[in-house]
Structures are given as C-alpha cells and as structure tokens.
Amino acid sequence: MRLLVHLVGAWVAAEAASGRYPRPISLALGVLVSRLGPPTALMALTGYAIQRLYEGGAFDGLRGRPVRRARPARRR
C-alpha cells in the first residue's frame, strides 16, 4: 500500500512539474508530495526527466514502423 501511495504521489508531482496545473495548485501539490519523503521525490524526478526526454524526441528511434499485414488471398 505504501508503494502505491508513493507511486501516485510521484505521478502527481511529475504532472505538476510539467506545467499541467496552474501555479498555485502545483505548489500545493508539491508541498503535499514533499511530505511523502525521499522515495517519492526520487520517483517524481525520474518521471519528470523521462517525460522531458520523451518530449524532446529521445525515444523516437525506439518506435518501430507500423507492421503491414498481408491481405488474405482472394478465392476464385
């Protein structure tokens, strides 16, 4: 249960840091998440860093091309 609380706190902190919420709300969320301690702060920073890398295009090469499926053979 503690892990779930820390994961949700880290997700909320990463979303607040990315600018999803207005400044007063993100500050309040930051204060609440900071009360959860170091594990949540570490997860939040990691999540924010991954999000910034994703937005910057760091993972574009990992996406494969869409697979074209062969058409079924026509019956005559």
Image: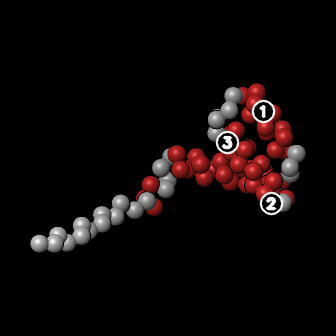
N-term mark: 1 or 2: 2
List x then y, in percent, for residue 72: 24, 70
Which secondary structure, mark 2?
helix
Amino acid type, residue under disc 1 in the picture: Leu
Which residue lies at the image location 44% right of the left edge and 55% below the top edge? 60
Which residue lies at the image location 79% right of the left edge and 37% below the top edge? 29
> In whole angstroms, how far apart are the C-alphas of marks 2 and 3?
18 Å
Which secondary structure, mark 3?
helix
Residue 1 sits in quarter: bottom right
Residue 4 visible somewhere in the drawing: yes
Name the residue that disc number 2 marks.
3
Residue 28 vertical placement versus 34 (above, below):
above
Name the residue that disc number 1 marks.
27
In front: 51, or 75? 75
List x then y, in percent, for residue 34: 84, 44
Which residue lies at the image location 70% right of the left edge and 38% below the top edge? 16
N-term mark: 1 or 3: 3
Q: How is the image coloured?
A: secondary structure
Q: Is residue 59 left or right of residue 47?
A: left
Q: Is residue 12 left or right of residue 58?
A: right
Name the residue that disc number 3 marks.
15
Q: Is residue 54 left or right of residue 76?
A: right
> In whole angstroms, how far apart are the C-alphas of marks 1 and 2?
23 Å
Residue 31 vertical placement versus 5 (above, below):
above
In front: 73, or 55? 73
N-term mark: 2 or 3: 2
In front: 45, or 68? 68
> In whole angstroms, how far apart are the C-alphas of marks 1 and 3?
12 Å
